[in-house]
Image: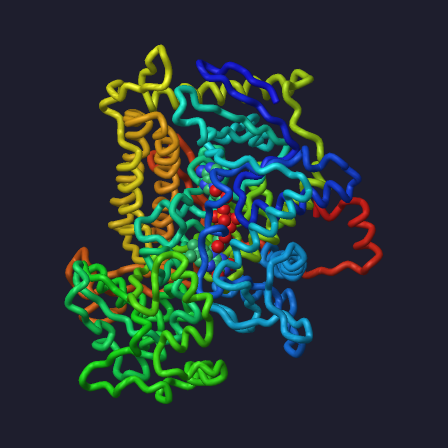
Amino acid sequence: METKQIGNKSVTFHRYNTVIVGSGAAGMNCAVHLYEFMSKKGLEIGAERIVVVTAGLGLGASRMSGSDKQTYYKMGTSPDVADSAEEFAKSLTAAGCCHGDSALVEATGSLREFYHLVQAGVAFPTDATGTFIGYKTDHDPYERATSAGPKTSKFMSECLQRQLERYGVRTIDEQEVAHLLTTGSGDGKRIAGVVTIDKTSVDKADYAINVYLGENIVLAAGGPGELYKTSVYPKGQLGIHGLAFRAGLTGANLTESQFGLASTKFRWNVSGTYMQAIPRIFSTDAEGKDEREFLVDFFPSMSKMATNIFLKGYQWPFDPQRIEELKSSLIDILVFNETQKGRRVFMDFLHNPVGSDSMKKFDINDLEAEAYEYLNKTGALEDTPIERLAHMNPPAIEIYKENGIDLYSEPLEIAVCAQHNNGGFAVDKWWQSNIAHTFIIGEMAGTHGVKRPGGSALNAGQTGGLRAAEYIANAYGCEPADYPPQDAYRRNKQDEIEKGLNQLVERLERYSAVHRTPFGGHLSADANQDGLVPEEVIADIQSRMTASGGHIRELEDGRRALDEAIKLYKDIQQRGFKLQDAKNIIKAIQAEHLSLTSAAYLKAVVELLERGSGSRGSHLVLAEDGIEIHPDVINKATGEPLKFKRENESLRNSILHIEYDESKAELFRCAEVELRPARRQRKAFEPAWQDYREGKIYSS
Ligand SMILES: Cc1cc2nc3c(=O)[nH]c(=O)nc-3n(C[C@H](O)[C@H](O)[C@H](O)COP(=O)(O)OP(=O)(O)OC[C@H]3O[C@@H](n4cnc5c(N)ncnc54)[C@H](O)[C@@H]3O)c2cc1C
């Protein structure tokens, strides 16, 4: 540890072999594996070479998000149904835009990582013979899913944290990432370190700046949850996409976010048994009055309507290919249509769905076969949804109770929310990014394609962490970053690091432009009256993203939104921020990089639309000559019936990459890249063993 004066700031430098950003399930797992790989190599002080830095141990999707039974997707463990890695990989790549090699790695690594979690203490259920019990999720033809209950990912990150503590690896909490320090250029470019602001120090006159230097950097800061206004991501989950773009990392498949029905008062997915219990779904006006059974006009019978509510359970994400012919995603569209009218939508677990005068009364025996057989098999044939839910999944009721909502006495408000990004940053089959020695794992890595089976995000996060750790320990070694540097080449690097830091300190000072009184602590807010207010900037970004980069997209609207997003980013560069007090420096940093994230996402949306894309994954593309859903489903912008364009399947064979380029008017440049296939050739045991012993597997 060394402290240096940079501008008028004192900056503390820490040196590690590997700096992991983010303490979610992905980051914690990578740290555990890295320690284990280092130990296997005989290194006794592995714990001193690794650090996890995080904005909040208790923050992020892993700690704070879930559903009725949050799903972990792994290769089948059924004793009588055979599964294989290739079949698993086929499910991951089925809807296109997904590399074959990383999909096969996720498949191959899935059981190893699943059992790693079991060993770490996650209580995945078994039967009396020790079989891990599976069930079916969205986009999943097998019963590969399993769950440790509504809070699977929380248990995962907690168990992994305990393991890290046993190993003695440090997690530094309350560190907001403010910058990624880069050195070199071209193939020699590196991310040399991560700059953080210690959040516990921001109300002091002189907040603390830390630099975590690493030979290797692993980014596991999760998805860009705060991008959207209507969101089920946990509050405060921001990610660091804007910072990563500025450091030169390449984005992939950013357009493929997932949206679906979730409760809004307490942010939680209403998938699985919440829908399989078949609650009544109704709307009210803004004051909660004037109840209406708004679904009834769109379905020909109670049986069809109730079966579709049931199917939303495991067909959870909004899917434009499940709208026509009265399929289950029509429900998402109708909920959205209702909220567009300024009405609120609720799930009522005390009553069965209520029909129109022309419909029969709800009768569980009238459900279509798929729904009836499931409920019959589960034995959940009780009279009311709450009884059926209590029968199938009592923890699903308890989680709401823990968060102040009693499903026995109040309806649950829902909306179509942003939930996950299948895209993120481009990585190879070792989860290494386009910058050597920088790895990207968890939701920040863009390894999923247009669709993914429910639960595969958690598996990808674990497998990616394993791969990054294995590569770091075996291909890059375990030495800490060299600082202060010993030779001329490295002294150059030091100059670059200090230059980067000087620029950052200058920027932070200029952005805040608040004057300190000589006796410390107090800030006068009169210095930058022209500056922007960080909270207003974030609210502006969120409204724009939900309206124009959400689950309904249209080219002209996207272009307008992109122009606004770029203008906002440039405004921030010119005008800086007006801070009410010192603590707001964190919000200012967040607002700035979130604004670049938003420009990147919108640029990708527009680019894909310009390439002739249609509705796919979890978003609908509007087109005047498209397919009308129903005369009463209205495009709010035009007042006309909403019409959508079908998927352009020719785009399934490539992935849209995006890179920050300051010289471009739109700040980013895009390129289509071909899909990498999975390698089919298999070597015999002896030559493969030799490759392994000689470390050739890290270069082939
Ligand atoms: C409601 C909901 C339900 C879900 N259900 C499922 C499911 O059933 N199955 C499934 O597979 N996936 C599911 N997902 C997705 C899955 O939970 C996430 O993709 C996964 O948990 C992400 O893990 P992670 O470790 O990559 O990131 P996170 O768990 O989000 O962790 C991010 C970490 O980075 C830190 N961080 C963030 N920003 C910064 C910053 N600026 N500076 C410093 N640190 C920062 C955070 O503090 C946190 O420690 C669900 C997601 C949601 C929102």
Describe the colour scheme in one phrase. Answer: rainbow
Residue 652, x across and y down, in percent? 46, 60
Q: Residue at x 29, y 62 (%)?
A: 413
**What is the quadrant of residue 400 in the picture?**
bottom left
The answer to whether 233 is drawn above or below residue 517 in the figure is below
**What is the quadrant of residue 405 in the picture?**
bottom left
Residue 653 visible somewhere in the drawing: no
Q: Nearer the viewer, residue 114 or 608?
A: 114
43 vs 165, left or right, is: right
The answer to whether 363 is drawn above or below residue 423 in the figure is below
Residue 668, x across and y down, in percent? 40, 38
Indicate the quadrant containing the N terminus: top left, top right, bottom left or bottom right: top right
344 vs 135, left or right, is: left
Residue found at the very far right of the displayed protein: 686
Residue 46, x across and y down, in percent? 71, 37
Residue found at the very far top of the displayed protein: 518
Q: Which of 533 and 435 is in front in this view?
A: 533
Q: Which residue is drawn at 31% across and 37% down?
A: 566
Q: Which of 624 and 50 is in front in this view?
A: 50
Q: Residue at x 52, y 46 (%)?
A: 426
Q: Which residue is drawn at 32% across and 87% down?
A: 363
The answer to whether 430 is drawn above or below residue 365 in the figure is above
Residue 294 visible somewhere in the drawing: yes
